[in-house]
Each structure stands twice: as C-alpha cells, then as structure tokens.
Amino acid sequence: LSTCSCPLIFPRRHRVLSVVGAMTVAREVQAEERMTEVVASSSDSGDDSANSSDGSAEPGKDREPSRGRCCGVGVGFAARRAFKVVGIIVVAITFAVGLIGWPLVAIDSQIFKENLLSVLFVIALLLVILEDHVGVNKAAVMLMASAAMWTFLAAGFHPHDSEQGNEEMQAEMDKSLEEVGRLILFLLPAMAVVESIDHFGGFSVVTRFIMTSTGGRQELLMPMLSLFCFFLSAVIDNLTATIVVLKLLRHTAANDRHVRHTIGGMVVIAANAGGAWSPVGDVTTTMLWLAGNISVGATIKWLFFPSFAACVVPLFGLWLQLRTCSIPSTERPSEEVAEQHIPEVRKANVLVLVVGISCILMVPVLKMITGLPPYMGMLLALGVLWFVTDTSSFHKLAQMPYEHQYHDEEIHIGTRPRTPAAFTQAPGSVVEALHSMDLTGLLFFAGVLLAVGALDTSGILDDYAELLRRLCGNSPVAICSLLGISSAVVDNVPLVQAAIDMFEEKPTDDPIWQLTALAAGTGGSILSVGSIAGVTLMSMEGVGYIWYVKNISIWAFLGFAAGIGTYQLELVTFA
C-alpha cells in the first residue's frame, strides 16, 4: 500500500467483519488511522498557511475531496483483501480435492483438470503481480500454488490403486524435479560465487574503473553496464551475468533506488538478448544446440545483429528516460562525485576478482569440452574460490586475521563443547558471504518451475503449442513471435521443448530454430517473471511487477519486435 498517494482510512461503518478476522483488521485500522492523522495534520497545516495568505479559502472545504479519495482507497483495500482470500481459498480447495481424492468425476476429467490448473496458475500470477498490495510474498504464493497443482495431478494418476499410475506419476515428478534441481543447483553456487567476490571487495576494482570512466555521470552508467552485460551473458550465461552486473550496479548507484531499478530493468533486457545469440548464453539456446537444431557458427552469424538490435533499441529509450529524470543529480561536478564514490583497491581485491571471474568462465569451457552440465562447473567454481580465500596466504594478503581452528592441545576434557560454526569458521570466510544471500528468489523460481511443470504434465502447454500452430499456419515469424510473447508469462523451457517436438522434421539451422532461440530469449524480458534474469532482479533489487510493467515492458517489447524485424531483414538481404 506504500504506492498509494493519499492516506488510508477504513471507515468504522464498514468494519462488520467475521469474528475470526476482527482483531487483525482492528489493529490494521488503528495503524492506518494513526498514519492518516499524521499525514492529514501535515497537509492541513500546509493548506491553512496557504489559505491564510490570500484569505479566500473557507475552512473545511479542502478536507472533503481528501475524504472521498480516502474512502475510495479503503474500498480498494477491501477489494485486494477479498481477492487474496479468494485466491487462498481456491488453492486450499484444489489441495483438499487432490488430498482426499474426491470427487472422482472432477479428478478424472481432462477438461476440468486443464481448466482448474489454468485458473489456479492465473490466480497465482495475479497474486504475484499484486504482491505489494495483497501483502503476501510471491515465493509463498508460488510454492502453495505449485504444491496444490501437483497434489491434484497426483490424485489423477491413482497411485495407490494402480502400479502403472504410480510409475507414471513418479516419472513426471522426476522429470520436473530434474529441471528444477538443475537450475537451482546452478543458481545457488552462482549467487554464492558473486556474493563471495563482493564480500572480499573484488568488485571494487570494476567499480573504480566504471566511476573513473563515467566521471560520476549516471547517464553513462546505463550504456556501459548494459553493453558489458550483453557480451558477458554470451560468454557465461544470462543468469550469472545478471547477478554480476546487478552487484556492480549496487556499488555504482547505491544511493539512487530509481536509477538502480531502471538500469536493472535494462540489464535484464541486455542479459536475455546477449544469451540469445550464443549456444551457451541461455538455457533455451543450449537446448536447441544439444538437440542438434542449431550450430555454433550459424547461430552467432545470424542472431548477433538481431540480438544487438533487441538490446540497443530499449537501451536508447530507457537512457533518454533516465537522463530526463536524473538531470538535477548530474549537474554536480563530475570530479566531486567521482572522488566521493571511488573505492580503494588492494591486491587481495584484484586476486579475488581474477580468481572468481576465471572460475565463472571455466563453466562454459567445461561444458563444451567434457559435456558436464553447467551446475557442476559452477559448483567447482565455488569450491575453488572458497579454497583460495580460506588459505592463510590470502588472509595475509588481505590483512585479515587468520587462526587455525584445530588445536588439539586447546581441547580439554570437561570443557563445554563449542558449536561447529563457532569452532571452524575463520574471520572473513565465504560462510559470512553465504549468510547475506537472499534465498526467496530461489524459492520463488522453484515454485514457478514446478507450477509450469504441472501445466506441462497435464498437457496444457502441448495444447497451447498446437493452438499456435493452427492460428499461425506455416508462418515461422508468426509462430515464433507468439511463442516469444508467451514466454513472458510461461517459462520458455517447456514452450521451446514443445516447438522442438512440433518441428522435428526441420533441418539444422533452419530459420524456425533460429527464430525460436531469438524469440524465446528476448521475449522473456517483456515481463519480470518471464525469465530467470527478471526474477533475479525482483529478488536482488526488490523490483515490483507493476513497476516493471509501467517502466520497462514497453521498451522490452519494442526491442523484441526490433530483433524479429532485423532477423527478417537479414533473411531478405543475405539468404
């Protein structure tokens, strides 16, 4: 409710609520009335002083419009609370039906199953969109919704009555768990590596370079970070590139939340666009590469300029928008700003940055040489960085205290045992960096993937893909455009898998595969929940869904359209 511009009043005559919620609502109303009194008193004093200067205003007239607006806000507050209650009730009913296995008609009906799961998924997305207004964390919403969807699906397999049904249910669950576990096992060490580099001051090297290059001018910060993220995401992947650049952004624009959010939205667009033209830059391009649908050389050749257009077009628009909003802050001398924010760089900072970035770059190299999945390379990267920063040589270089934690002569019989954390953790350890990680984004992403997996298991996504084919006919541009727009709402992995199954007769490097990689990668930027990079932005910077839609989505859509148009122009010109 912090986005509301007027005080919140919930009139006493509207407080006829259930006995269960009466005490909770009363406390909320009292807090709201206290806030209203403070805001109203300050605004009234300002109005009275203004009115006293000309003597033409009558007392009490300025309060009536405010009361009307506040009553409207009170009604909106009640509507949002009602929607939250309805959503939770739908989730609870779905879970209960799947738990007790009744009624069988509803459980065994394919049409009812698809409709119910679709409605439940839409309600969960709406609750995520209105997170700031309904007061429920998005991770909790998606975890409850995904659990309810899978419970309902499990009842349809009748695992206790049929051995075949039990095996089919376990196979579907294992398939979904494999996808979720693979991404979580990649995301967790990736966040830990980046957080560790930041904990030991590694990013101060890049921060110093950025601040000296830009001279403290924020209008140069966006293009520099966006282009860096565009090329970095092609070398490693869009998720890790987003985490790295958002950490740099937090250091270079720490005092301006609006600037960080705007540049962060552009970072999401740049990361997804950069991952579209590299076989190792995005999970969907990796899927197409491993399936033999695209090759490395042709992908880079045909998708680089469309991906670059998908990045540059929104970059230009958001840069003009940010420059217009940031004119007052950029009027200060650049030398003063630079001197104020430039951090000190030591040898240990450089060492941590070099080791950390080298370990991250090792991930795609291991994948291409040995075929290891990316999460194994990222786990290895975390282990190497952890080992290096735990050595006594590094602690001496960083001028941090180091004490060996295992001295048998210090352990005496009868002494009180110490906890393992207090006994083994050295000052300045990676463990301290792990404590500062925010895991709500991981849980939210796991819930989204599990919910989409439930939709895939029920056959909804296959039906949707077939619907796209019937609507668009044999037009690759129309099919891939709708596929990219759909990936802004639904995870692009099952959509791309459905496209692979639909067009399996197409040869390698066919335009349909290149358009699929481009559209699925850049289309996810249209909404913040459409890609893991957007979800990471919501988690690390606290960007709201509605704010993203208002400020970023239109530019992301224009970039998406520019990328598709550039690819078509390439085909017409060079094919």
Image (spheres, helix red, strand yellow):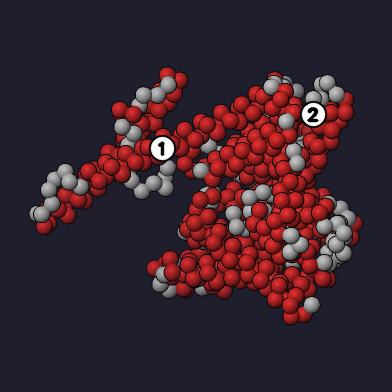
Circle 1 residue: 77
Residue 329 lies in quadrant? bottom left
Residue 140 lies in quadrant? top right
Q: Residue at x 61, y 71 (%)?
A: 312
Nearer to us in this view, 277 or 370: 277
Q: Residues within 10 Å of mark 1 (few under 14, many from 20)?
A: some
> In the rendered view, does 219 fall on the left or right side of 461?
left
* Kind of residue indicated by mark 1: Phe
* Kind of residue indicated by mark 2: Phe
Nearer to us in this view, 552 or 383: 552
Q: Is residue 90 visible?
A: yes
Q: Tell me the SS state at disc 1.
A: helix
Compared with residue 397, is residue 152 higher up or lower down, i.e. above or below?
above
Coordinates of residue 436 in the picture (x, y in percent): 61, 45
Residue 424 lies in quadrant? top right
Coordinates of residue 523 in the picture (x, y in percent): 65, 59
Q: Is residue 184 visible?
A: no
> In the rendered view, does 18 fall on the left or right side of 444?
left
Circle 2 residue: 157
Coordinates of residue 151 in the picture (x, y in percent): 71, 29
Q: Earlier in the sequence, mark 1 or mark 2?
A: 1
Nearer to us in this view, 501 or 553: 501
Q: Residue at x 72, y 43 (%)?
A: 460
Q: Tell me the SS state at disc 2.
A: helix
Q: Residues within 10 Å of mark 2 (few under 14, many from 20)?
A: many
Residue most extreme to the bottom? 573
